[in-house]
Amino acid sequence: MAYKPVGFVLGWAGGALAGMAFQKTWKLIRHEDDAPDALDPDRGWGEILLAAAVQGALFAAVRSVVDRSGAKAIERSTGVWPTQAGGRD
């Protein structure tokens, strides 16, 4: 239960970090400031799906790093590994 507020803050910060990482990564890949949006009529399927795949991979990786780091910090400070809601460990 003590991890929920910490997890919320870490999740928000991780999302912001992942967004910045995606923007920088997209600029490196395509040399463009803005990634395509699914509703952008001037972009093809390939660009849109590439952007979605890169963004999804970065968000998942950052979330895993943030969640795991937060859980380890809680364990170090309390001696107990935090559990997820719904009874999953």
Image: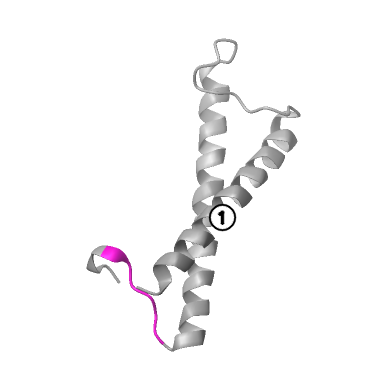
- Residue at point 66%, 46% (across, down): 21
Q: Position of residue 35 (x, y in %)?
A: 63, 28
What range is drawn magenta here?
A: 80-85
Quick one: label 1, few (<14), some, or many (20+) residues within 10 Å? many
Q: Main secondary structure of the magenta part?
A: loop
Which part of the image, by quadrant, shows the C terminus?
Answer: bottom left
* Residue 31 within the segment the image draws in magenta: no
Q: Is residue 39 left or right of residue 2?
A: right
Q: Position of residue 57 (x, y in %)?
A: 52, 46
- Residue at point 67%, 38% (across, down): 23
- Residue at point 24%, 64% (across, down): 86
* Residue 84 within the segment the image draws in magenta: yes
Q: Is residue 85 left or right of residue 63?
A: left
Give the amino acid type for the residue marked by disc 1 in the picture: Gly
Q: Position of residue 12 (x, y in %)?
A: 53, 53
Give the residue pinned by disc 1: 14
Q: Is residue 22 left or right of residue 1?
A: right
Q: Is residue 37 above or below residue 74?
A: above
Q: How is the image coloured?
A: one colour
Q: Position of residue 6 (x, y in %)?
A: 48, 67
What secondary structure is marked by label 1?
helix
Q: Is residue 3 above or below residue 41?
A: below
